[in-house]
Image: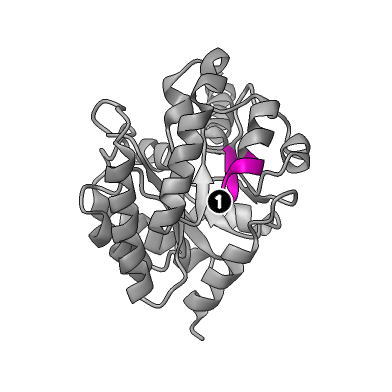
Amino acid sequence: MTEQTHKAEQFRELHVPGTPLILFNIWDAGGAKAVAKSGAKAIATGSWSVAHANGFGDGELIPRGQAIDNLRRIVGATDHLPVTIDLESGYGNVAETIGLAIEAGAVGCNLEDSFRADGRLREPADQSARIRSARQTADASEIRFFINARTDVFLRQPPAQHSEVMAEALARAHAYADAGADGLFAPGLVDITLIARLAEASPLPLNIMIGDASPPVRALAQHGVARVSYGPGPYLIAMKALEEAARAAFE
């Protein structure tokens, strides 16, 4: 068993409903080292943070090669922890992009079901085909690569209307599971009752992202969530602290 294979198995086993994997998303090798020292069990990048840290906007504006090189440095800086990368919508050729991420040392990824240009949702059949292609590439590498299928259903509706799109989210979860996805990521969902419904009904372990309106991690755990991400939050915290320190210095 190679080290990467072992990390992939380790990462998969960390997704336990009720005892969620906590991912404090980072953007570079230095941040990865800092989070690793905190007791993290895995390292995850956040696409928004990686892009902004390198002078780009979000939405696959940072070149794929640069994102993969950044991943390779992060993997090298945290050689004892599994690393998962946010690949947004996969940069067009999903299979090729997954292959590059695996070659760079990743054991998992996020893959979105919206178009980066305008945020429109892809048809479930289209996204399922993309997940199936990613699965085939991952399986050919003999790494149990964790495909975290992100659905943007809840990002396209205000929270008051989230109950109305729950059926669509569940239909996508089943379709993505059938295509070979390993997890369901539902950013934007903040109502704990709906989160509990989705966690119970989803065929895939549920990933929720922490935001200003999110329930606390303890509540998410109690309602069956298997993975908690912090998204751009850590980057924003770090940049605010940097700005305040710089302002104090110049004063």
Q: Is residue 122 above or below residue 99?
A: above
* Residue 132: quarter of image: bottom left
Q: Which is nearer the eye, 125 or 134?
A: 125
* Residue 13: quarter of image: bottom right
Q: Which is nearer the eye, 48 or 109?
A: 109
Pinpoint residue 31: horizontal percent, then vertical percent.
53, 50
**Residue with the mark numbered 1:** 204
Indicate the amino acid at tag 1: Leu
In magenta, the rendered stretch is 199-208
Pinpoint residue 176: horizontal percent, then vertical percent.
42, 49
Residue at 28% from the left image edge and 40% from the top image edge = 60
Q: Is residue 23 left or right of residue 54?
A: right
| Secondary structure category for the residue under label 1 | loop
Q: Is residue 162 magenta?
A: no
Residue at 78% from the left image edge and 41% from the top image edge = 222
Q: Is residue 27 visible?
A: no
Pinpoint residue 50: horizontal percent, then vertical percent.
40, 43
Q: Is residue 29 left or right of residue 160?
A: left
